[in-house]
Image (cartoon, helix red, strand yellow):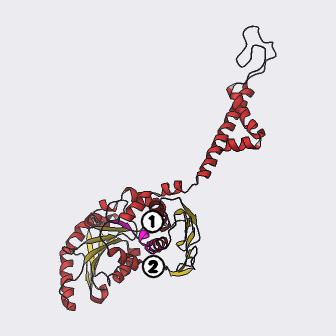
């Protein structure tokens, strides 16, 4: 059953909900939570479909907040609220209210949503796209115990992870983190089967996929080992390789549905690891409304720290040696430039004390600049053992 309301108020929307429940013969309210979806017109259909599918597991009142942008300056000065109330088969197992906000009322969406919340029931706010940088400080996010975002839908997903870490508040979560739940479960189960120590990890996946970064940060945070992030053509996560002191453990998923788990000394096993739909991800997030401390710890580990920790010590030593050699070459070039700028003189040197850089017997003494200029040449002609020592 659908009820359309034009230029309405929150009070009239509540009356329409009661009328709709009585019309279908279910006057009692049997919802367990309120799910608020903040989206635009383009993504509203997909988000609402996912919420309706998830409502079969979590009966809820779904409030879809769509902020409509008026085209003309005159229309922007006029505030209006249009609503569409759905109950019964058109709303899954719960109730759905689609709210379209025009004009100044779009900046005060919390005043429209607040009267429609179920009493004594938890509130979850979900931003499928265009999530605020700090969801907890958003007027709608402040009403919720749980705030769901999706960094995969942002323009710069990896950079968005840094912003999420800086603004994290208990209750925040991300669908990019939810997507790797089967991977985390499978890797933890694989480690429970062996008594080996993990020495290094490699995570392979798409370049701009925040789920890959979150999985790598989780492994680095929990195992305290170097984690390398490598790229592949996808889809999504494709492989995780853990090097242990008793052989490698590899979880490889090349086609996005079926994975192969390989453990040293055991036969390979096929594992169902398909990519899940948004409805399954939302249903998983609605199962728990308490803060996710594991997600917070992995998020705060940081992408920058992950990239810095993935550089091997030998590579860092080689980079330092190259930088030192480049500095010596720069000093040599500067010394040569100054020598060319000094005019040559054919006049005999005046009698008196020896000049700077000249010994009493007339022999030339190397200045520090000349010594720096000749240093690269000396290292080039040094014997092989001396070269290795200098590199170390």
Within 10 Å of the Cα at label 1, are there few (<14), some (14-19), or many (20+) other Cα atoms? Answer: some
At mark 2, the secondary structure is loop
Residue 232 placement: quadrant: bottom right
Q: Quadrant of the C terminus?
A: top right
Q: Position of residue 307 (x, y in %)?
A: 53, 56
Task: Using residue 127 as the reference point, say whether residue 336 is left or right of it.
Answer: right
* Precedes in sequence: disc 1 or disc 2: 1
Is 294 or 109 nearer to us in this picture?
294
The residue pinned by badge 2 equals: 276
The residue pinned by badge 1 equals: 154
Residue 342 placement: quadrant: top right
Is 50 or 378 nearer to us in this picture?
378
Residue span colored magenta: 169-186
User: Which residue lies at the image location 73% right of the left edge and 27% below the top edge?
Assistant: 339
At mark 1, the secondary structure is loop
Q: Quadrant of the N terminus?
A: bottom left
| Residue 223, numbered circle | none
Which residue is the extreme one toward the front?
195
Q: Position of residue 193 (x, y in %)?
A: 49, 73
Give the vertical position of 1 relative to 195 (above or below): below
């Amino acid at each position: 059953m659908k009820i359309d309301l034009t230029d309405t108020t929150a009070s009239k929307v509540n009356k329409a909900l009661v009328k709709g429940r009585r019309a279908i013969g279910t006057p009692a309210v049997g919802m367990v939570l309120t799910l608020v979806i903040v989206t635009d017109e383009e993504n509203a259909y997909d988000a609402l479909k996912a919420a309706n599918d998830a409502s079969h597991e979590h009966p809820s009142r779904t409030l879809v907040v769509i902020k409509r942008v008026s085209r003309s300056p005159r229309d922007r000065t006029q505030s209006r609220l249009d609503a569409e109330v759905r109950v019964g088969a058109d709303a899954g197992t719960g109730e759905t209210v689609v709210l379209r906000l025009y004009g100044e009322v779009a900046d005060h969406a919390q005043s429209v949503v607040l009267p429609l919340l179920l009493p004594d029931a938890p509130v979850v706010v979900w931003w499928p796209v265009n999530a605020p940088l700090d969801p907890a400080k958003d007027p709608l996010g402040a009403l919720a115990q749980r705030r769901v975002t999706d960094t995969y839908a942002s323009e710069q997903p990896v950079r968005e992870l840094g912003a999420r870490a800086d603004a994290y508040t208990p209750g925040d979560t991300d669908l990019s983190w939810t997507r790797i739940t089967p991977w985390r479960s499978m890797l933890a189960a694989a480690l429970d089967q062996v008594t080996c120590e993990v020495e290094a990890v490699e995570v392979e996946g798409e370049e701009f996929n925040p789920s890959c970064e979150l999985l790598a940060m989780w492994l680095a945070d929990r195992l305290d080992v170097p984690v390398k992030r490598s790229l592949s053509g996808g889809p999504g996560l494709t492989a995780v390789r853990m090097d242990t002191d008793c052989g490698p453990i590899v979880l490889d998923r090349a086609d996005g549905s079926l994975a192969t788990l390989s453990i040293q000394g055991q036969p390979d096993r096929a594992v169902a690891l398909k990519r899940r739909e948004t409805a399954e991800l939302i249903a998983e997030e609605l199962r728990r409304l308490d803060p996710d401390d594991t997600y917070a710890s992995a998020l705060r580990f940081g992408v920058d720290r992950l990239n810095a920790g993935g550089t091997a010590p030998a590579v860092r030593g080689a980079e330092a040696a190259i930088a030192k050699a480049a500095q010596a070459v720069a000093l040599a070039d500067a010394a040569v430039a100054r020598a060319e700028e000094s005019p040559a003189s054919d006049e005999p040197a005046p009698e008196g004390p020896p000049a700077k850089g000249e010994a009493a017997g007339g022999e030339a003494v190397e200045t520090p600049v000349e010594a720096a200029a000749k240093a690269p040449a000396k290292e080039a002609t040094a014997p092989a053992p001396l070269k290795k020592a200098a590199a170390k």
